[in-house]
Amino acid sequence: MLACSTLLWTCSPTPATRRPAPMPLVEAPAPEIVTPSLRRTRTLATLLRLTEKPRLSATDLQVTFAADRLTTEEGVATLLSGLDANDDSVREDSRTLIWQLPPEFHPELVRLCPARHRSLVAQILAAQGRRAVVWLNDLLNWHASAEDAGTRLSVFTALGAIAPEHPEVISAITRGLTDSDAQIRLFAVTYLIDSPDARPLVETTLKVLRLSKDRTIADTARFWQDFLKNSRVARLGK
């Protein structure tokens, strides 16, 4: 009996071992595709938060660019590309940030700026005054190649602010007296009004400008004609 019991016990089937249910397959997240537009948006958003500080520093910019794996050159190019964005707010944000770039970033700004945005950069350099004299040759080259009047006028303004007595600046602005754009001719007149050497060409230019259909230009030309006449009378009276 005992032997039978032992036999039954040893011959009883072993309970089946439960296998764990297979875990459902989870797909790995697709890698984020960082397009130039997305990178620009990120950079702008970060920098705009930083502009809440009194001044946007070079360190702020370098850290922001590095966080998105941008070199200084790529970072400045990213800001410049924002000026051509379809979104109005992106264009405005880019313009604001470019205006706030510290002078340490002006080499990249001048070198990378496309011709269509040189008017903006010329205004930024003009605001630096004589400290921006290192960009004199670049501005002279920009003026020589500028096809639109807006850029030529902005460059003239910058040249006058940066190196008003430089011979090449005076020569360039003197050529402005014969520019096809009346606003530029008027700017040149105003700049050279006290120059004895330019007086004959200034007076000739004013005779044409006073006939302009633009009332502001015509009135300003007459003002400068009266100024020259009164100056001549004052000199004769001495």
Image (spheres, grey):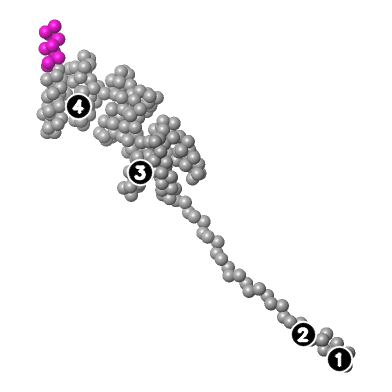
Whole-Å distance between the Cαs marked 1 and 2? 16 Å
Which one is nearer the viewer's eye here, 71 or 144? Answer: 71
140 lies above or below 41: above
What is the quadrant of residue 154 in the picture? top left
Residue 197 pos. (x, y %): 22, 15
Looking at the rendered structure, the secondary structure element under dot 4 is: helix
Q: Quick one: quadrant of the C terminus?
A: top left
Within 10 angstroms of label 1, few (less than 14), some, or many (20 or more) residues?
Answer: few
Dominant secondary structure of the residues highlighted in magenta in the image: helix
Q: Which residue is mark 1?
A: 4
Any mark on residue 13, and which?
Answer: 2
Nearer the camera: disc 2 or disc 3: 2
The reply to whether dot 4 and dot 1 touch (C-beta < 8 Å) is: no
**Distance between the alpha carbons at the discs numbered 3 and 1:** 93 Å
Q: Earlier in the sequence, mark 3 or mark 4?
A: 3
Camera-near label (4 vs 1) is: 1
Please rate how many residues cluster around mark 4, counting C-alpha atoms within 10 Å: few if below 14, some from 14 to 19, many from 20. many
The amino acid type found where label 1 is placed reads Cys
- Tell me which amino acid carries mark 3: Asp
Left or right of residue 69, residue 47 in this image: left
Which comes before the other along the chain, label 4 or label 1?
1
Q: Is residue 165 rendered to the left or right of residue 32? A: left
